[in-house]
Image: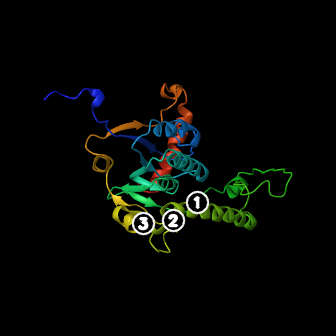
Amino acid sequence: MALLPDLFRPRRPVVSVLRLQGAIGVGGARGLSDAALAPLIEGAFRGRPAAVALQINSPGGSAVQSSLIAARIRRLADDKRVPVLAFVEDVAASGGYWLASAADEIFCDEGSMLGSIGVIAAGFGFHDLIARLGVERRVHTAGRSKSILDPFRPEREEDVARLRRWLDQLHEVFIAQVRARRGARLADDPDLFSGEIWIGRQAVEKGLADGVGHLAPVLKERFGPRVRMRRLAPRRPFLSRLGFSVAEDLAALAEERAAFARFGL
């Protein structure tokens, strides 16, 4: 039997695979941000793919950047009517889970870490140290609330109360995002939004993921064995690849490693 000309061959389904690796909004060439990812996200939805798959490995980071990236993915998914599948690798925690929640379905490995639906702020206090060194801190402001949480001054109760209000407001935004995207799939568990982490199948039981599964097998089962994966990932700037921004890259790497280290990674 003569082979069909290419013109008459059935088209292979194409799935755009977008890799989201690293901390969110840490700056430098390594961090994930809406501005840096916008061309890649828009490219992933170009050409009417059968689906867009998100490979996520992120410990979180900026709440606003997480929200902007997730919102961009959803806008394009709804406009183009393209399903989005998320595949969690080591971790999708905090802002990393915010990104995963943009997908219509979430898959994870048996050992993947998901959740940490909370907000954190951390810093240091140096006022005792500079006092021992005989250093005097001088700050002049116009506006009663201009200088708050100064690490070189003793912590003030009113500053801590203000910070807690901010964190609570951001937490409510995060919770609303997860509830809107996961809906009735979420378990009725008071710890779900406590910042707790769940592993693999336990995350599925809590409704944070839809199943345990890996990228290639799930896509082949969903779209057939001939599915073609079109991979996209952020590229480091040219000068950074040549080593001209070593200090910035090292600072961003240290911040990213600290974020991953919170999950033992």
Quarter-of-image position of residue 147 = bottom right
x then y, percent, for residue 31: 53, 42
In this picture, residue 169 sits left or right of residue 209: right
Instruction: Depth check: give the residue in front, 19 or 43.
Output: 43
| 219 is higher (above) or lower (below) than 200 | above
Residue count near mark 1 (Cα–Cα under 10 Å), binned few <14, some 14–19, many ≥20: few
Residue 226 in the figure: left or right of residue 190: left
| Label 1: which secondary element | loop
Q: Amino acid at mark 1?
A: Ile
Residue drawn at x 51%, y 52% is 60
Marks 2 and 1 in Cβ contact (< 8 Å): yes
Q: Earlier in the sequence, mark 3 or mark 1?
A: 1
Percent across and percent down for residue 82 are 45, 47
Disc 3 from disc 2: Cα separation: 15 Å
Task: Please report contact status of discs 3 and 1: CB closer than 8 Å, yes or no.
Answer: no
- The quadrant of the picture occupied by the N terminus is top left
Q: Amino acid at mark 3?
A: Gly
- Determine which of the numbered discs, if any, sits on residue 120 in the image: 1
The front one of 157 and 62 is 62
Residues under labels 3 and 1: Cα distance? Answer: 23 Å
Is 254 left or right of 6, judged from the image as shown? right
For marks 2 and 1 on the same chain, the one whose residue lies earlier in the sequence:
1
- Residue depicted at x 46% and y 51%: 260
Say which amino acid is labelled 2: Gly
Q: What residue is disc 2 on? A: 195
Crowd class of label 2 (few under 14; some 14 to 19; many from 20; radius 10 Å): some
Q: Position of residue 115 (x, y in %)?
A: 46, 61
Look at mark 3 in the image and give the residue it sits on.
207
Sooner in the amino-acid sequence: mark 3 or mark 2: 2
